[in-house]
Amino acid sequence: MAAYMRGRFDFLGLPTPQRRVLSREVLAGLAAPVEADLRDIAHMCWDLPEREYQYFGCDLLVRCARQLSAAFITDAERLITAKSWWDSVDPLATRVVGSLVSSHPALGEVMDSWIAHENLWLVRAALLHQLNYHEVTDAGRLFDYCRIQSGHPDFFVRKAIGWALRQHGKTNPAAVRRFVRAHRAQLSPLSVREALKHLG
């Protein structure tokens, strides 16, 4: 796993299926934690060197995302920008931040700041936070974000643009086709390819 992750992190060596079983067993035995406990546990997981602990922190936050207050967005930002890689950023973005913004729409203003941030992982999180919104996606915000970052040089941002558009294309394919057609010159080939992957 360390080689797959380009040597970025230390690992305990737990295979993913085994880790998931252990996480489920631990979480199943817990009473519903309060937000302060969730915050403390998550940051403790991020302080430990082995990557599996960050995975556990993600699992815990995903499980309890609906009970988090709007104030947790500050903690989410800290976690996204520490030990950053797609394997922790994506579940935090799509399952934790996405839930926070859905439950607390005023946090859309935070997403508006993230999309213009110099930290590429916050940009990626802003692009992906609506990934599971389906019919209630704020398409205007999604397209604005993709347009704002259409020229971003980083692979992970370009990939996120395509992924977000592809996902929205399952709900509104015509709108995604129109957007790609209108902005094809600004979008990277990777973003275009990902966006149109299932649209023909």
Image (cartoon, rainbow, N blue to C red):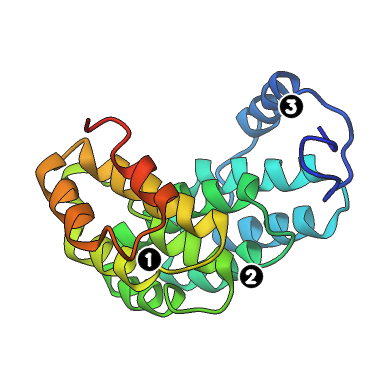
Residue 165, compared with residue 25, is above or below; it is: below
Give me the C-alpha separation between circle 2 and circle 1.
25 Å
Image coords of residue 83 (percent x, y): 74, 59
Quadrant housing residue 29: top right
Q: Which residue is mark 3?
A: 19
Which amino acid type corresponds to the residue marked 2 in the rendered image? Arg
Label ID, residue 78: 2
Q: Earlier in the sequence, mark 2 or mark 3?
A: 3
Which amino acid type corresponds to the residue marked 1 in the rendered image? Ser
The reply to whether dot 2 and dot 1 touch (C-beta < 8 Å) is no
Of residues 158 and 104, which is closer to you in this image?
Answer: 158
Image coords of residue 79 (percent x, y): 64, 63
- Crowding at dot 1, Cα within 10 Å, few <14 / some 14-19 / many 20+, comes out as many
Q: What residue lies at 54% left-to-right and 74% top-to-bottom?
A: 74
Quadrant housing residue 172: top left
Which one is in front in this view, the residue at disc 3 or the one at disc 1? 1
